Amino acid sequence: EGMVAFLLPENVNPRWEQQDAAAFVAKMKEIAPDTKVEVFNAGNDTSVQQRQAEQALTQGADVLVVIPIDGESSAIIADTAAEEGVPTIAYDRMINSENTKFWVQADMYATGAAQAQHVVDNTAKGDTLVMLKGSPTDPNAAVIAEGQMSVLEPLFASGERVLGYENWTQGWDPAIARRSMDQALTQLNNNVQGVVSSNDGNAGAAIAAMEEQGMAGKVPVSGLDCTVQAQQLMLLGKQTQCGWRPLHEMAAAAAEVAVRLMNDQDYSDLATRTVTNGVGAEVNFVPVDSYSAVGPEGVAYVIEHDPSITKDMVCQGEAASTDFCK
Amino acid sequence: MQHELRLSLADRMRIMRQTRFGAFVPVLLALAAIWGYFGLAAPLLEYWSDPDADSLRLIFLSPRNIYNLFMQSAVIATLAVGITIVLLLGDIDLSAAATAGVCAALLGVLVLAGVPGWLACLMVMAVGVVMGAAQGLLIAYVGIPSFVVTLAGLLGYQGLMQKILPTGNLNVDDPFIRAIARILIPDMLGLAMAVGLVVLVMLAALRRQAQRRQRGLELDSSLALWGQVGFFAVITFAAVLTLNSYRSVPLMIVLLVAITALLGWITTSTPFGRSIFAVGGNTESARRVGMKVNRIRVAAFGIVGLMAAIGGIFGASRYGSVSYTAFAGGSLLLESIGAAVIGGTSLFGGRGSVWNAILGALVIGSLGNGLDLSGASSADKLMFSGAILLLAVAIDAVSRPADASSR
Amino acid sequence: MQHELRLSLADRMRIMRQTRFGAFVPVLLALAAIWGYFGLAAPLLEYWSDPDADSLRLIFLSPRNIYNLFMQSAVIATLAVGITIVLLLGDIDLSAAATAGVCAALLGVLVLAGVPGWLACLMVMAVGVVMGAAQGLLIAYVGIPSFVVTLAGLLGYQGLMQKILPTGNLNVDDPFIRAIARILIPDMLGLAMAVGLVVLVMLAALRRQAQRRQRGLELDSSLALWGQVGFFAVITFAAVLTLNSYRSVPLMIVLLVAITALLGWITTSTPFGRSIFAVGGNTESARRVGMKVNRIRVAAFGIVGLMAAIGGIFGASRYGSVSYTAFAGGSLLLESIGAAVIGGTSLFGGRGSVWNAILGALVIGSLGNGLDLSGASSADKLMFSGAILLLAVAIDAVSRPADASSR
Amino acid sequence: MTTDNLTAGSRTPPPHLRVTGIHKRFGGLHALRGVDFEVARGEVMALVGDNGAGKSTLMKVLAGAYLADEGEFWLDGEQVLVGGPTDAADLGIQIVYQDLALCENLDVAANLSLGAEPVKPGWGFLPRFLRPIDEMEMEVKAQKAIDRLEVRTLKSVRALVGGLSGGQRQAIAIARAVGAESSVVMLDEPTAALGVAQTRQVLNVVRRLRDTNHAVVYISHNMRDIFEVADRICILRHGANVGTWRTAETTPDEIVVAMTRGLDEGQTHAA
Amino acid sequence: MTTDNLTAGSRTPPPHLRVTGIHKRFGGLHALRGVDFEVARGEVMALVGDNGAGKSTLMKVLAGAYLADEGEFWLDGEQVLVGGPTDAADLGIQIVYQDLALCENLDVAANLSLGAEPVKPGWGFLPRFLRPIDEMEMEVKAQKAIDRLEVRTLKSVRALVGGLSGGQRQAIAIARAVGAESSVVMLDEPTAALGVAQTRQVLNVVRRLRDTNHAVVYISHNMRDIFEVADRICILRHGANVGTWRTAETTPDEIVVAMTRGLDEGQTHAA
Ligand SMILES: Nc1ncnc2c1ncn2[C@@H]1O[C@H](COP(=O)(O)OP(=O)(O)OP(=O)(O)O)[C@@H](O)[C@H]1O
Ligand SMILES: Nc1ncnc2c1ncn2[C@@H]1O[C@H](COP(=O)(O)OP(=O)(O)OP(=O)(O)O)[C@@H](O)[C@H]1O
Ligand SMILES: O[C@@H]1[C@@H](O)[C@H](O)OC[C@H]1O
Ligand SMILES: [Mg+2]
Ligand SMILES: [Mg+2]
């Protein structure tokens, strides 16, 4: 008995519905088969997410698992829930509230650094790079960018690499990323040797822009999430890297904590660490691993480790004729 | 044609529709259809089709959910009321949601900087008026179509909001501002206000009727008269009692109703309001009888700006924060124009009412609220909301006796 | 008033505006203003203010950027051309972008399932027509305002697109579909086509003039006549030569122009097109002269649906992928309606042209393109685009001799 | 209402178009209360009545612009259905509306051909509504029609109707209706805005229509014009028939009295 | 143009409103080509001319609805500026437009008070445009005005104008103009859509206005009406003056000839 609500931020990135929610629902079915799980998607609108939280509470939710659109406006969700005695778990993105009970995420700083390092490793001295950053309202995007800069800043300063163009991507919208890339290429007259993209959506957009210039496949492009689409591009050699996290482990951790919270059980054995969030609250934290997948080997690794992705899913369309799929 | 078909019914509908109350009919029908669906049909269906369900749960119509619904629709309603004013002129405002966003962001920054809440509210209301009126000036005196000016305004104000809030969001915990959404009118006071209102409306109706008789003017049929008063009483008491049985009437709802009443009175009962309808009905005629069409237009856009600012304050209070997507970047724009239009206000000007905008906002709000109570996927929810909205508005259109074209 | 002011100039403007060419003037002025700003003013400013700049870089007006601009604006333009048709009727379509999204998603799924590209294109075009016409049926025969129907359509089709694309995006690598954006018309062929077109237009103008003389009809002033032909020739050659000097004319642009030409011809030169203008100008009159207003409305919405499907195909081809945000969830909706309105098409119906929609799309496209070439923050960019858009359209409004109101 | 009365009498030519028992309500307003009306070929039937008597409403019903709530239509003795303007046009009914029903955003030539644009020959493979309009043919026709009505101040048939004077517009509406193929032509106050010369031309046109065996309905408040062209005069009052007179057997004064006061005994009069 | 001529002669009362050299162009169309016009208090000046002669355009210029491209205005010998309808209204100029200029979405009472709504007393702390409208006062006034014009078929002053007959609308437009405070009343074809009885009432109103020392301008194509009420007749042709006649000294035929053909020697005529 009981109910858990899983609140997703948007439908731009396929991972939320396809991987996180699916894994969470599966895990819940396994460990608490009687518990109802309701999945909501706010479509990148914070007022919608608040409404969805209210509706979940009205329906009698016992725990909220929230991937906020941003860290601030989600505070009221945790606060309202707390007023009703309902605990809130922050998933992937932190909620800046005293009432955030738990957070699960990988080390995004390191992930950003790995993206940048990959591009640096595949470019030469004096090469020009383009940075396609994430949504300015997503706390992760800022952390990822910091991680990237930790690698790039010294190189830019010394002139070993040149920052040709950088832009944020409101709402992680690939359409916006596409135009950024077009303009980068125009402004730099195609003088681009590497693209540090903060996630796969941006990477896909950058690749489409470069295809038009006959550059796709000749330039390293980083990404994050290892979506099916990104893995196909990796097999085709157009995208060269993607940061991968075991999303099923994140979902499982959240599910286990949720069940404990629902039953008022102690969960300190699950959350071994704490972090301090934006309002100075100590939040129990489970870090998950991350992996920097590069090339077809990277794809093989992800297919092996990510239960939501199979080789058949990746080997479709143009990608079906690559060596990897044959 | 040459038959005695649909006579009495159609005629009675027509006559009813010609009273003031009649303008509510379509949107009330739509609202009733949606509430009927979410409140009764959907739960019953679920109950019957799911053998495991142990009891019928009428969550949608529960006082708690109605309370939620009112609060969830309040920002849309505030903006829709403002937008109705410019729609009456035959103009449109695409920037209202972004204006609300700028005002909310400014409010957040001001209180963070230590400006007292009430002062900050007054300041952003002034800013809202200026933002709206500035667009009105361009529309009226430069002669650029309102769609284009307010599209530019949308872009510009979106940028301004980002400028004020570089991270895109900000918590607002000023007690004065949060109080707007949090303060509840004590149950008894709420009821007393309702009784007072209903008595007032009744007395006004009686006095009016007596004066008309005295001056030898055509009288309203007493059925229509008492029907309207009764309708008003039922709505008022139903709302107050429902809200009381969950928590109480929230201050924000009282404020919204009061502001709408004021605007409703201005639009229907003052020379200024009359001139808005005249300009919307026939701009050239209005100009020729000496109305200052340009000034009226600027004033109307000033009012939208004011309502947008109030919407921004309400939003900041309710969300406890200001975020780009909740205002400028999200669906608020289309939802609030949609609320006004669903309320029956014509995009061509000259026809509509601010009260209907509130009902339209409830229609829009009910879609999201009701669907979020169901377990559907987000794709299904979107598809459902389209279908339900369509069905709800079609009910009126179909029930209306077809005749000479109207759009 | 009682003075000899602004006579010759104002009059000359007025007369010019009354030719067919005249309708282009406002949006051309706006476009020229924007291109002037980004192409010359902004780089010059930067050059002067930045002592380090080694050379003046006129990137915006470079052939390569013009090529980008055309391609970036193509999807908006395709939708705007369709939307113009319903605006001419006095209706609006909020669902066109979502329809494009559904069609693009369907296209992606179909080719993935092995349907040949050309067949998939035809299929989604049929689907687009059905999706548009279905809304048209509700608007025409049930009598729900188009704003509400297409708002519901927007929601429903957004849901449908998510349903078709559960992952939110999909790569499209079918060679046929990708070819639409990739194939370039060989330079010489492009030039030959341009010459052919110009000669054709010239001959047609001559023949028309001769026939009119023969039948004793009022003649166009030869200045106006040759002005228009010359204008057409300059635009055509400028476009072809610019595109050739970067790569060549892309097939997609040729297709867009061809489709627009067809629709332009239909709207201005056939009884069907005439009836669209008549319905938009005075629905009741159109009905009374026996026009099938309902069928015309359904057909017009079918056309928007078709254009949306084509927009979806163009988008899938250009982006090499289909994503929710690029179509249904993004800014495409407002941008394409905005393009039509900036092009001078009235929201009140009866006035406008599909060609202007293309120019309007270029205006909108230039804003994003030009600002992304600058290093400004996204807040600044938004604010700039609002300001520039406003200035650009104001230039025409201010230059127009003020007279009896117009909206 | 004595329908039989109306058609009785050997002096009356057999009616071409006849309606009986027409009712039309607008909300609570009962605008036509069982009106009978008829017109024969080769005659001009005047329809008169006070302002708001229901003349225009009756015309709109005949033209299919309004649907009657009740009532029957006969054409040449056969009952017909009129469900819309197209039905009426198919039956050969043409009308000049009192409010003219022009499209201000279109030019004179387009308005004159509205709904019946001439198309160029040789495009038979396309459905008619997609064939190219023959603009020149349209302009030639328009010019002729305008010339016939002597509207000399109208310089160009390519001027937008939105900028025309009241009389110029009325002339266009008349030209449109009388230019089309028809057996019944109804003119609702066609000369209200016309000058002296143009009015004379319209009266000539009306006579010409009668002589070419059309059935003509002529609405006017001008007794002189009516007595000049009408063969019979039908009076409406408060949405009901007062009666029908032969012009030759009555006087303007009698008509005016019947129009404003009705008949004393409340009995309809038939000619 | 012999401006002096127009005002010369002892038989002519001193003009109250006088304009000279009015030019108005619409794009390429030169609608008024230096027109002179005047009207005195206590006289009815008829303005006649063919369709499209420029009568309505001249009236709109006088009422401030159009701005003249050139020309001068005098009121009681003093030059004035008319920059818009409000200026004209402030000078006491009221007008019935040929196209009526009513708001179809408002009811009869609202249209009759449009732009001059009576407000309830006792709200002096508010600016006038925000005080409550005195609806009942408005309806009473409207009912009286309508009754005076004998439009008996108009049942309620709360009916929307959009549903009224042509004559009913015209009556409302007339009632609005003659009901307001004014010194000059201009009526542009006020009886075009009116019935016999209503037309008679309007002519009475015109006479009453003259007798109360108003300056009245009356435009019509109906020579009978003109010769019944007008003191002088001013003829426009192709946007220019043909001349002005005293009604007592001319005949309808002479006027019609001058209207359609102009004067032979091309010289203007002044009365
Ligand atoms: N669309 C409508 N809605 C409501 N009432 C209407 C409508 N059309 C006409 N009426 C009413 O019906 C009655 C008859 O109107 P109608 O236009 O037929 O009069 P009429 O005889 O043509 O008068 P007139 O001589 O003034 O043109 C009037 O009282 C009018 O107000
Ligand atoms: N707004 C306008 N735009 C363009 N042309 C106009 C406009 N108004 C009037 N005209 C033209 O100016 C001329 C004079 O028109 P006006 O309406 O003054 O004539 P009128 O004397 O009132 O004629 P009528 O007796 O038909 O009412 C006409 O040729 C008309 O086409
Ligand atoms: O996985 C990413 C997530 O961490 C971030 O918050 O939003 C974008 C996603 O791609
Ligand atoms: Mg009539
Ligand atoms: Mg006139």
Image (spheres, coloured by chain):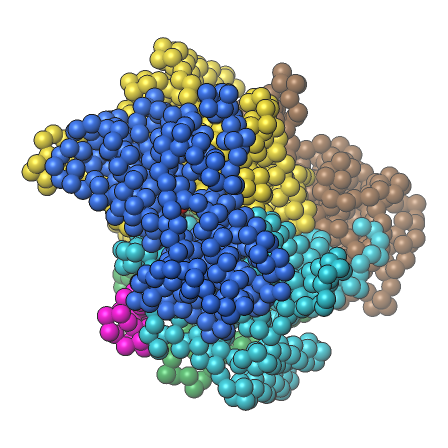
Chain colours: A blue, B cyan, C yellow, D brown, E green
Residue B323 position within the rendered picture, expressed as x and y whole percent measured from the top left: 37, 59
Nearer the observer, D122 or E83: D122
Above or below — where is B265 with respect to A38? below
Above or below — where is D271 with respect to E108? above
Nearer the observer, E166 or A61: A61
Q: Residue at x 27, y 38 (%)?
A: A116
Magenta span: B105-128
Residue D238 located left or right of residue E114: right
Residue D195 located left or right of residue E165: left
**Can residue C188 be seen here?**
yes
Question: Residue D255's quadrant in the figure?
Answer: bottom right
Residue C376 located left or right of residue A218: left
**Can residue D35 be seen here?**
no
Nearer the observer, B400 or D82: B400
Residue D226 position within the rendered picture, expressed as x and y whole percent measured from the top left: 70, 49
Q: Quadrant of the N terminus of chain A?
A: bottom right
Nearer the observer, B12 or B282: B12
Q: Main secondary structure of the magenta part?
A: helix
Q: Is residue B313 magenta?
A: no
Q: Which residue appears farthest toward the left when viewing the image? A: C51
